[in-house]
Image (tube, rainbow, N blue to C red):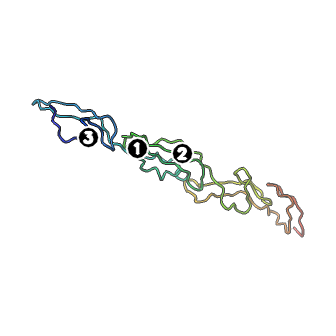
Amino acid sequence: MCEITSPPEGYELVAGQWRCTEGYAGAATATCVADEACRSSLQLAGCRKLHSCLPPENPDPCKYDLSGCGDVAPGGFCRLRCRTPFAGGSPKLICPAGNTDPTYQMKWTEPYCFCTNPDPVPLGFEEDGQGGLRCSGGFVGAPQLRCQQGTTCLAQSEVWGCVSPDVCHIKDFLDEDDRPGRITGKARGRI
């Protein structure tokens, strides 16, 4: 007959059957082993402690927010979000239900995070109706938008590239054409 000493952590005897306790995964097996002195002892195997999953490495902390993914329990999930001023998708990162690997990093697919227009849109710029910007009437250039400057994260997007064409210092100029990149009008007074 096998001697039953106190079972190791992670095992319990229920209705004559060994099983893994809560917080452990696997299939419990019990083996009766005899030593040199013919004393038998019970050896239990098969149950492994469940572990929370680790977040993946963040390739761009200015763009991606993994703040809710630090300690996801087995079977749980978190959402990867785009950090402001970016916007876009928020895919789930899932910790496998029976995770027993303390070093397991959740897998993810890079979401599409895009740089949003500043709010309010500054003078000289206007929304183009397709999610982008263009120069307002009376301004020329090509709008440029950024949500980070190198490794520096920005709290709000920045836009530049549209300027007032005041090159000739014309006084009392009335622009009669509000199409982007075009100026048509008459100058009154002296140049």
Q: Nearer the viewer, mark 2 or mark 1?
A: 1
- Judging depth in this view, the residue of 82 and 164 nearest the camera is 82
Quadrant of residue 10 within the rendered picture: top left
Q: Does 110 sit left or right of 71 as displayed?
A: right
Residue 24 lies, in percent from the top left, at 33, 41
Label 1 residue SS: loop
Residue 19 lies, in percent from the top left, at 29, 37
- The amino acid type, in three-letter code, at marker 2 is Pro
Q: Nearer the N terminus, badge 2 or badge 3? A: 3
Q: Residues within 10 Å of mark 1 (few under 14, many from 20)?
A: some
- Judging depth in this view, the residue of 149 and 8 nearest the camera is 8
Quadrant of residue 100 within the rendered picture: top left
Label 2 residue SS: loop
Kindly identify the residue that appears in the image at 58 percent across and 58 percent down.
154
Q: CA distance from mark 3 to mark 1?
A: 21 Å
- The amino acid type, in three-letter code, at marker 3 is Glu
Q: Which residue is mark 3?
A: 12
Q: Which residue is mark 1?
A: 74
Q: Which residue is mark 2?
A: 91
Position of the N terminus by quadrant: top left
Residue 64 lies, in percent from the top left, at 53, 50
- The amino acid type, in three-letter code, at marker 1 is Pro
Kindly identify the residue that appears in the image at 89 percent across and 69 percent down.
190
Label annotation for residue 2: none
